[in-house]
Image (cartoon, grey):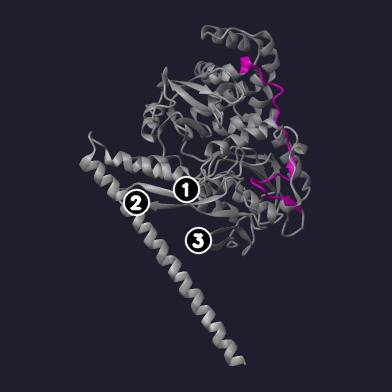
Amino acid sequence: MMFMKIIKNGLMLLAALFLSQSIQAQNITDINRQMSKFGQTLMYLNNYYLDTVNINSLTEDAINSVISKLDPHSAYISAKDVKSMNEPLEGNFEGVGIEFAIIKDTLSVAAPIAGGPCERVGIRTGDRIVRVNGEMIAGTGLTNERVYKYLRGPKGTTVNLGIMRKGVPDMLEFEVVRDKIPINSLDAAYEVGKGIYYLKLSRFAQNSANEILEALIGMKAEKINGIILDLRGNTGGFLGTAMEISNFFLDAGQSIVYTEGLKSPKRIERANGTGFYKKGPLVVMIDENSASASEIVTGAIQDWDRGVVIGRRSFGKGLVQQIIPLNDGSQLRLTIARYHTPSGRVIQSPYKAGEAEKYYMSFIERYKKGEMFNKDSISFPDSLKYKTLVKGRTVYGGGGIMPDIFVPADTSYYSEYYMNLIRRGIINEFMNNLGDQNRTDWSAKYKTFEKFEKDFRIDEKIMDDLTQYAAKKNLPLDSKGFETSRSEMAIVMKALAARTIFGNTAYYRVINSERDATFAKALEVVRSKDGL
């Protein structure tokens, strides 16, 4: 009987293997047939069509059409665009500073690069650039190459962008002065209190981990009493860098992330135990623009109860792209798997294949439903509840990382007048001019940041000068809007003055200390060691 059972199982295994090989062979035959069909079509077009055809262009259009039917993050990159697509992470260039996507022949802002010209004037994720220097570009057969020609250019040159923004009926006009796009990914690093360090990381670039280590060494951080890692607005970058930075905080063997797909077996990435800060207070700050690598790091820290996550639900970009080179130097960036946090949560927000526009618009719906302002507007079914791996706390899946402590967005100081000052770059331009005129005097008067923070004021004269400067730029004073935004404007102007004297870190020191509720909560948690 046992012998017959073995024979039966063996025959079943052979049948399964034969079926698998048959299916695989059938798939290869089908693929070869379709490749031949497409090749024949191109040949007939080239040989018989009544007009001249550009075979290269037709092929690229066909590939783009196929890729557009897949998930929202798979992409085709032409040979000439491969190098420039990597520049924000690997090098530097001069331009306006955005990550973009072309959706339905419209240039959409995927994210403004932190510290870049577009971010400084208030261009946001989700904005659509429809006009450049008076030329309508939407619906004109946009390509990456054309976008680069429109937006890149020598430092100091100006480009005027016409923006359509969801919920705003009229086109918004922005004046953007091109600049060198920041090569450093660590925008700010400073000691908040005794042994407590704030690190603002704008993206996960090739050298980010070294930047953090060098900053801590430069601050002589021998004893660390707490770290606040600010990943707000960080849209991601290199997976390897996310592994390096996660490793700073986790014990050997703890999983950081795992990937799994239909044709990609489960692969777990683990910490190697060489991290420099595996114990002690840790807070990660995120918001709706934190994505991809940011979510991998945040999810690992949350799932292992290693730190507290504060802010608002992250973006939800959790698809694994594999770079596949093609024979002409172009690339497919093809989604092959999903990222899962250590507890099993899927990071990726839901989407339907071939509906990229609806996918991106779903994030506008979050705003309209009040998610940025009220935690209770977000509900999760029981199927999306998970448990952390040390303390068994409830955390949530369903796309993005939900913070442990929710801090609503503050729009109480918004006014159309203030937004126009930002969008048109008037505040930055005015403060740059003021800084140039007063840099020597300010540097002599404020020897330390502490003295500057205590004594420097944006007085009535500076405010009056700003409104007059704006009026000369064809932005007349709106008294009501000015009063609504006066205090916020003063903080931003003070932060810009601080940057003139002390550099980029000083800008964040002013913003954090004077009006950032998320930072204030993070500092409170670190100092109290609450939940750590």
Q: Which mark is residue 326?
A: 2
Asked whether residue 70 is in view, the answer is: yes
- Residue 475 versus residue 111 in the image, above or below: above
**Circle 3 crowding by C-alpha within 10 Å: few under 14, some 14–19, many from 20:** few
User: Which one is earlier in the sequence, the residue at label 2 or at label 1?
Assistant: 1
Considering the numbered disc 1 on the image, is that residue within a helix, a strand or a loop? Answer: loop
Q: Looking at the picture, tell me which residue is in the foreground, 209 or 120.
A: 120
Confirm whether the magenta stretch covers residue 84: no
Question: Residue drawn at (31%, 39%), measured in percent from left and top?
Answer: 57
Where is mark 3, residue-wise? Answer: 263
Marks 3 and 2: which is nearer the front? 3
Mark 1 surroundings: few (<14), some (14-19) or many (≥20) residues within 10 A: many
Q: Is residue 41 left or right of residue 362?
A: left
Range of magenta residues: 394-418
Residue corresponding to mark 1 = 206
Check disc 1 and give the amino acid type: Gln
User: Among all residues in the image, which is located at the extreme left?
Assistant: 47
